[in-house]
Amino acid sequence: MAAGNRTWERPTVFPNRSVKWAVYAGVVGFFLWSGVGVGADPARIAQGLGSAGSLVGDFLPPSATPRQAQRILDKMLESVAMAMVSTLTGIVLSVPIAFMAAENLSPKPLYAINRGFISVSRAFNAIIVGIIAVKAIGFGPLAGILTITFKTVGFFSKLLAEDLEDIDMGSVDAVRAAGASPIQTLLYGVVPQIIPRFAGLSVYRWDINIRTSTIIGIVGAGGIGSVLLTAFNRYDYQYVTAILLAIIAVVLVAEGVSAVVRRRYN
Amino acid sequence: MATEQRSWRRFGPRRRIARFVLLLTAAVTVIASWRFMDTGVARPETIPREVTDLLTRMYPPDVAYTTQIVQPLIETVQIAALGTLGAFVLAIPVALLAAENTTPNGVTFWLGKLIVTVSRSVNTIIWALFFVVLFGSGPLAGAVAIVFRSVGFLGKLLGEEIEEIDFGQVEAVRASGASQAQVLLYGILPQVKPALVGLSIYRWDINIRDSTVLGFVGAGGIGVELFRAVNAFAWQSVAMVLIVILGVVVVTESLSAYTRGLVR
């Protein structure tokens, strides 16, 4: 009875408590090393945050001259237009790639190549792709369209390929057994199964593309981003705030539209 | 008997018209968008040639350059790690505010939602512009930018997890005489801990990718090297940096997928 002097200890996911503490120590050590690496000394952070107050004062209130407001509007429309066009081009290009990247529909070598392409597209941030696109074909919205299209293909074909891998092969076999050609099998056996997801994904990607199109202008790939960077470089912080508010508004509207549409299709 | 010539149609007439109008609107929007933009392409057929031209200049990648990018690469990983840690710490209170069942009152609920929205709507690179002004250029500005970007993401998703918890357990802990802090620690946190860890690892993975571009605005990391090489037209070095980034991203992505599998 007296030997049962046990206290409750929280259960742990680790094999035992020493492993748990070793993992924790390792993680803490890694973060400390990182902190030293990036020069995150508390004094500097405190100083920076201390001057944040006066800096935030410089950013308020948002203001833009009529000419600047016009420029925000023009460039914002350019951003939205870029997103519209590249959502379409991206999705059109994604469809064949998705079919080739679906394990159940595509031969092994083709599958590997397309999965590789998808990984490459997903690995690079839009800004990096944007810089390379600008160097390749020059400044302007065309570089932006190229960038967003490239990013869309990676995202869209990956998710679409996963949906294709999840389809019910029974209905595909049924269509094939009824004597359908390969094309007809695709059209009547596979496509109807993914159409609802396809619509939802398209709108979702459109929403992401609107976000992307508002920033890649920073590297000269068209849209509102270029205006933002110029304003920042001129220390015109009230104008910066006005631009940011415009970006946030557009992003929120896009997100709202996308949420409403996706709720209808899911 | 022969008079009734019916054929199967998937949609009724109203749906058909609606779908047609929808498609037409989409087509008009895309065409109008294309015409609105001053793309300045006289000859779109030259685009593939220009892109291939650039890609050929990238080959072969400059392998010797690797030694120069190890340090910036480590810095990128550190920025992402610290940024995720900071976001992890800040996201817990934000999530508690933004979850309908734990927020104290209406005002705090909207405050939580506001923080989440602003954080999520402003891209990492824009946050970085701001913090470079504040902290001067360097990786610290980058790490703080990552924190501010990730708080909204983690706060939103964690808040949704908190809204799904079983409140009975919270009541039980409270009924046994626990203080507010103890309710939080023993009633709420254990229920969302797997989600919290999983989401943070997921965000860390995204942050690695995001922090590769911080260098463009002077916020440290491998981006600094990348943009230096791009501006020097050293395409073979650029190719090497891109390959290294690809390698790191692939590794972190599989690591993140593996660990998230463990905690689920």
Image (spheres, coloured by chain):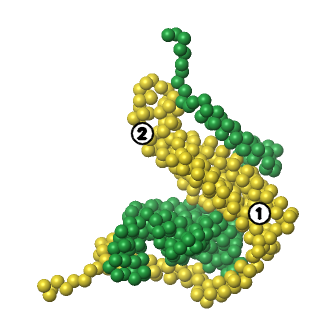
Chain colours: A yellow, B green
Which residue is most to the top?
B2
What label sits on residue A168 in the rendered view?
A: 2
In the rendered structure, the answer to whether residue A180 lies left or right of residue A260 reads left
Q: Position of residue A138 (x, y in %)?
A: 77, 55
Amino acid type, mark 2: Asp
Separation of marks 2 and 1 at Cα, in angstroms? 47 Å
Q: Residues within 10 Å of mark 2 (few under 14, many from 20)?
A: few
What chain letter is assigned to the residue under label 1? A
* Element type where label 1 sits in the image: helix
Answer with left or right where residue A242 lies relative to residue A172: right
Residue at position x 57%, y 30% in the image: B12
Label 1 neighbour load within 10 Å: few <14, some 14-19, many 20+: many
Residue visible at 61% across and 45% down? Answer: A91
Instruction: Choose top left, top right, bottom left or bottom right for residue B140.
Output: bottom right
Q: Amino acid at mark 1?
A: Ser
Q: Is residue A260 visible?
A: yes
Residue under label 1: A226
Q: What is the residue that sits farthest to the bottom in this orientation?
A: A43
Looking at the image, which is closer to me, B66 or B31? B31
Position of B98 relative to A150 (above/below): below
Q: How many marks?
A: 2
Image location of residue B44, percent across then percent down: 76, 44
Q: Are marks 2 and 1 on the same chain?
A: yes
Residue for point 50% across, 31% down: A188
